[in-house]
Amino acid sequence: MIIAISTRVTEAQNYFEKRNSISFDIIEYVERLGLTPLLVPNNLSNVSLFLEAFNVEGVMLTGGNNVDPKTYGSLELLSDVYVERDNTEKALFEYALDSNIPVLAICRGFHFINTHLGGKLTHNILGHVNENHKLVSEKLEYSNKEVNSFHKQGITVSQLSKELEPIALSEDDLVEAYENKKNKILGFQWHPERDFNDFDSKLIKKHYSIK
C-alpha cells in the first residue's frame, strides 16, 4: 500500500537554497507499519498527476514548518512559514478527499487540516514542547495513554473545525486527536513515529485498513 507523505521545507545554512526534507523516523515508522512511503516534494507543478502515477492509496501530512496564519485569518507573524508547503498539503488533502482515501495528520498536518476546514490555532502555548502528558478521552483506546509533545501552536475545542470531532484532549484541554469518519480523516497532535506505541500504531493500521 503506497502512502503519499508530505515533506518539510528546509534551507541550506550557508547559502539560499530551499530543500525538501523529512525525518528518518517517519520513513522507518511507515515501513514498520507495513506501508510503502512516497515522498511528495513541495515544488511539484501538478500534485494530482504525481499521485495518480503511483496509484496512491493513502495520505500522511507530517510535522515541521508552521501553517501560514494568513490562511486562517490571523494577523500573527510566525517564522518557518512556506507557501509551497501550504499549497502542496492543500493539494494532497483535496486529492485524498476526492479519491476517498484515508488521511493521517501529524502535528503540523494536524494544524493544517483544522485550519483548512475553517478552524483556528492558538499560538505560543506553554508546556507542550519536549514534554510527555496523558490523554483525556471517553474512548478507551485513548484514555490515560501517555504521548509526546513538540508543538508551540495548539487547538482548543472551540477552535476545532465543525467538520472534525475531538476524540482526545490534553489535561489542559487542548485537542490531541480528532477524526472525521465519513471523510476518512484521523489526526494526532503528537508524533507517533518518535515512540512507536502499540496503541496509536494499532489505530493507524486500522485507519489505513492494514491487517
Image (cartoon, rainbow, N blue to C red):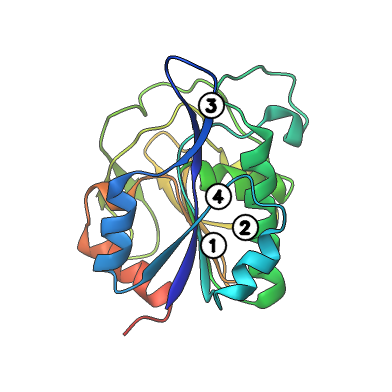
Q: Quadrant of residue 80?
A: top right
Spatial separation of the CA atoms under disc 1 and disc 2: 6 Å
Residue 82: % across, % down: 63, 31
Q: Nearer the viewer, residue 111 or 94?
A: 94
Residue on which disc 4 sits: 41
Residue on which disc 1 sits: 179
What's the residue type where badge 3 is placed?
Glu
- Numbered label attached to residue 164: 2
Residue 147 shown left or right of residue 72 in the figure: left
Mark 4 and mark 3 lie on one chain; the one further toward the N terminus is: 3
Choose mark 2 or mark 4, whichever is in front. 4
Choose mark 1 or mark 4, whichever is in front. 4
Mark 4 and mark 2 in contact (Cβ < 8 Å)? no
Q: Quadrant of residue 198?
A: bottom left
Residue on which disc 3 sits: 17
What's the residue type where badge 1 is placed?
Glu
Mark 1 and mark 4 lie on one chain; the one further toward the N terminus is: 4
Residue 169 shown left or right of residue 55 in the figure: left
Q: Residues within 10 Å of mark 4 (few under 14, many from 20)?
A: many
What's the residue type where badge 4 is placed?
Pro
